[in-house]
Amino acid sequence: MQTFIKQIRTYLNMSQTEFAEQLNVTFATVNRWENGRTVPNKLAQSKMYDLCKEKSVPVYDMTLKKISEAVEAVSPERNRILLYHGSKAGIEGKIEPKSRKQCDFGKGFYMGTNPSQALTLICDYEKSKFYIVSIDTDKLAQIEVPADIDWAMLVAYHRGRMEKINGTDFYNKYRDMTADKDLVIGNIANDRMFFVIDNFFVGNVTDTALVNSLSALQLGKQYVAVSQKGCDAVRIEAEISLSYIERLFVKNTAEENRAKGISLANDICRNYRREGLFFDEILDKAKDGGQ
């Protein structure tokens, strides 16, 4: 964190003495922070957060730059894809497909193509860790789900939203879609998309509005190792700890992006509110033998 504090102070064009005065600490305290002898506590980091907010210090961008520099230092083999993973308490031992069953694509080890998604997932957790990982997909049974109604219905299946049509061909289609796979690739139902897809499930928006929102929100992709073979193909390339102030700025940025995404999604849903089918209508049609 010592480099990070110096970056903030340099951006503010302050001496260590001036920076200390702003935070109501001593020069010696700031000096020890920047020399790595001590780490500022939560109270000090909260004061730093307020100062950075007041002075518009781009702390979130600094965090992304730190990750970018770590990525540049990684030299994976040509056949490996670099991805990002956020863990609430850090990875210990073997990587396994053990996320919650009702995640987008079921139990698995989730990785994303965009660092901001992984950061958002862990910003509320004190012991969280951010990881740069890589995966060799060459020998994995995999499926890539396009950003369309199949994606939405696959998420619906894994979130337990289709149980009332259990046993139908329609239900079995999504049950079997990823059953024999090691790796599932598809769009991320992040904070922005979660709002839309949840509204789809409860009957507030149609499938047409949902699909158009998928396209407009430009979501990143997630790679999900859903078998142990898939997890064994994953390798941790770098582990990055996040300070309290960084997590505060990640949370703040995530909330701003979510609000913007929801506003955009609302506009799209209004434009397509009379087109397509609602979720219950799709399930009723499937129950009656339709597709």
Image (cartoon, rainbow, N blue to C red):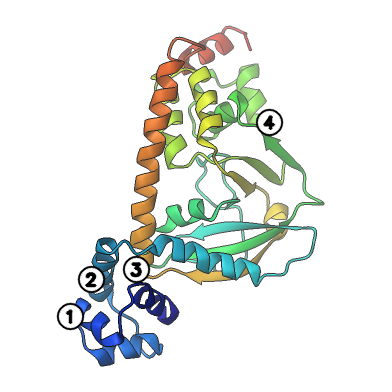
Describe residue 31's horizontal placement relative to residue 286 as left or right: left
Return the residue at label 2.
47
Question: What element does badge 1 sit on?
Answer: loop
Q: Amino acid at mark 1?
A: Asn
Describe residue 90's horizontal placement relative to residue 143 as left or right: left
Q: Position of residue 279 (x, y in %)?
A: 48, 18
Find the distance from the CA under tag 1 to the CA under tag 4: 60 Å
Looking at the image, tell me whether mark 1 or mark 4 is earlier in sequence order: 1
Tag shown at residue 24: 1
Residue most extreme to the front: 13
Viewer-closest of 204 and 62: 62
Question: What element does badge 3 sit on?
Answer: helix
Find the distance from the CA under tag 3 to the CA under tag 1: 18 Å
Q: Amino acid at mark 3?
A: Tyr
Tag shown at residue 244: 3
Return the residue at label 4.
176
Q: Residue at x 42, y 41 (%)?
A: 191
Q: Residue at x 43, y 29 (%)?
A: 196
Looking at the image, tell me whether mark 2 or mark 1 is earlier in sequence order: 1
Task: Give yes or no for contact between labels 2 and 1 (Cβ–Cβ under 8 Å).
Answer: yes
